[in-house]
């Protein structure tokens, strides 16, 4: 894991007394901000250059762009703006997943982002051809399966806390989608707003501005629910957490995952009935589900993903260890069987030898 970069922030420009600030000063500041708003250009070049370099985001150009990005973000606070970007820091070619259709030099990205982009694109294309995708507001299929490896510890002890957290998150996410007229939760995270993209072509909407507003909202929501999840441990660095605290957070994360993914369709599943009986009997959850409110599942991945990954990694390690032990047992059994076969063969050879000796002796007597 890489250490975070350390940025030396520029000192804020010393302003005159607020009583002396006139309308013209504010207009000058605003015009300067608009003229040198290079944040999007810096971010896009960083992504493209990282995709092209074998060093990825550790490429020298990307590291320099990271510093410029920090300066550009703080412009409103410090008054320092990135007026010029070196030519070598600006991307000339663009990976296909960035969908820069107005540019000539576009290449097929070989990174994981490119692979995922094309795979998803092919899936969407197939579903459109089958008529499974329309322009109407879409909802997640309800027959998906839960990853049982993520069912961890005494998760049911945090059932109510997880539900309250999910219920609040669901309301906020619905409000965000309604506010920006976004079709579904996945468009929120991807920034690929299908409705806006069509309107942008007609010159009605600036998608980049909308994307920034949505992402700003998502960033605030993440910090808000992370604080709700960690509570007293929010300010504590992950490296300083005790074993008991880590176990607590993993158990709570499991509860958040379960409450976010379970729906009424799963009640019919016999395996789920045994494991998640307490959820299916929880009145608040039942009432919420029966209202038919569109389900959102981003909460666990936005807020507690690091703990879910730790749970999964632990499970994989246990299964690998168990597999090796079973393999050793099988090898031991095979060796024992081989030994028995050898001993049996040796016994058969001894019997044949004794029989032959007996025959030879009888022949000798007759002579």
Image: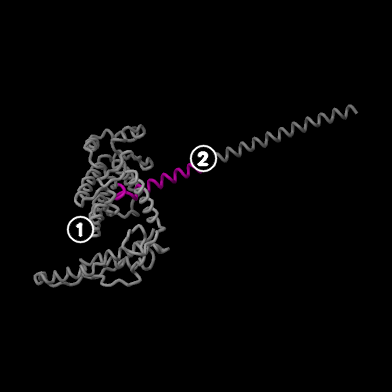
Secondary-structure class at tag 1: loop
Instruction: State the residue in front, 18 or 97.
Output: 97
Q: Which residues are magenta?
A: 300-325
Secondary-structure class at tag 2: helix
Decide if residue 97 is on the left or right side of residue 32.
Answer: right
Residue 293 position, x and y percent, is: 22, 41
User: Measured along the vertical axis of the image, is residue 366 above or below residue 169?
Assistant: above
Q: Earlier in the sequence, mark 1 or mark 2?
A: 1
| Numbered circles on residues, count | 2
Quarter occupied by residue 17: bottom left
Can residue 11 be seen at all in this image of the molecule? no
Q: Residue furthest left?
A: 19
Q: Which residue is mark 1?
A: 204
Decide if residue 321 is on the left or right side of residue 121.
Answer: right
Q: Quadrant of the C terminus?
A: top right
Q: Residues within 10 Å of mark 2 (few under 14, many from 20)?
A: few
Instruction: State the residue in front, 334 or 236.
Output: 334
Residue 195 position, x and y percent, is: 24, 52
User: Measured along the vertical axis of the image, is residue 132 above or below residue 103?
Assistant: above
Residue 202 position, x and y percent, is: 22, 58
Dot label at residue 326: 2
Instruction: State the residue in front, 336 or 102.
Output: 102
**Most common secondary structure along the magenta stretch:** helix
Q: Is residue 219 magenta?
A: no
Q: Residue furthest right?
A: 367
Q: Quadrant of the N terminus?
A: bottom left
Quarter occupied by residue 59: bottom left
Q: Residue at x 36, y 50 (%)?
A: 120
Instruction: State the residue in front, 232 or 288.
Output: 288
């Amino acid at each position: 894991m890489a250490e975070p970069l350390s940025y030396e922030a520029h000192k804020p420009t010393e302003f005159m007394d607020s009583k002396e600030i006139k309308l013209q000063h504010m207009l000058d500041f605003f015009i300067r901000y608009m003229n040198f708003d290079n944040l999007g250009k810096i971010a896009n070049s960083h992504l493209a250059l990282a995709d092209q370099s074998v060093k990825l985001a550790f490429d020298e150009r990307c590291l320099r762009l990271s510093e410029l990005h920090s300066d550009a973000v703080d412009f409103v606070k410090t008054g320092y703006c990135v007026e010029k970007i070196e030519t070598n820091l600006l991307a000339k070619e663009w990976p296909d997943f960035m969908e820069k259709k107005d540019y000539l030099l576009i290449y097929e990205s070989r990174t994981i982002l490119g692979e995922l982009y094309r795979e998803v694109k092919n899936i969407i294309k197939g579903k459109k051809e089958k008529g499974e995708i329309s322009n109407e507001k879409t909802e997640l299929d309800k027959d998906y399966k839960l990853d049982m490896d993520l069912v961890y510890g005494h998760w049911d002890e945090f059932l109510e806390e997880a539900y309250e957290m999910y219920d609040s998150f669901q309301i906020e996410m619905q409000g965000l989608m309604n506010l920006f007229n976004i079709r579904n939760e996945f468009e929120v995270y991807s920034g690929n707003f299908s409705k806006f993209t069509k309107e942008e072509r007609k010159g009605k909407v600036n998608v980049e501005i909308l994307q920034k507003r949505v992402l700003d909202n998502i960033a605030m929501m993440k910090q808000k629910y992370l604080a709700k999840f960690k509570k007293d441990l929010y300010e504590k660095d992950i490296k300083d957490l005790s074993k008991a605290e880590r176990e607590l957070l993993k158990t709570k994360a499991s509860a958040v995952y379960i409450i976010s993914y379970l729906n009424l369709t799963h009640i019919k599943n016999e395996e789920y009935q045994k494991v998640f009986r307490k959820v299916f009997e929880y009145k608040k959850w039942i009432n919420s589900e029966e209202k038919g409110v569109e389900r959102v599942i981003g909460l666990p991945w936005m807020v507690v993903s690091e703990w879910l990954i730790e749970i999964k990694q632990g499970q994989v390690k246990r299964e690998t260890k168990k597999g090796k032990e079973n393999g050793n047992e099988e090898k031991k059994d095979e060796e024992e069987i081989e030994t028995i076969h050898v001993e049996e063969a040796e016994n058969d050879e001894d019997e044949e030898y004794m029989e032959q000796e007996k025959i030879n002796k009888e022949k000798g007597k007759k002579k």
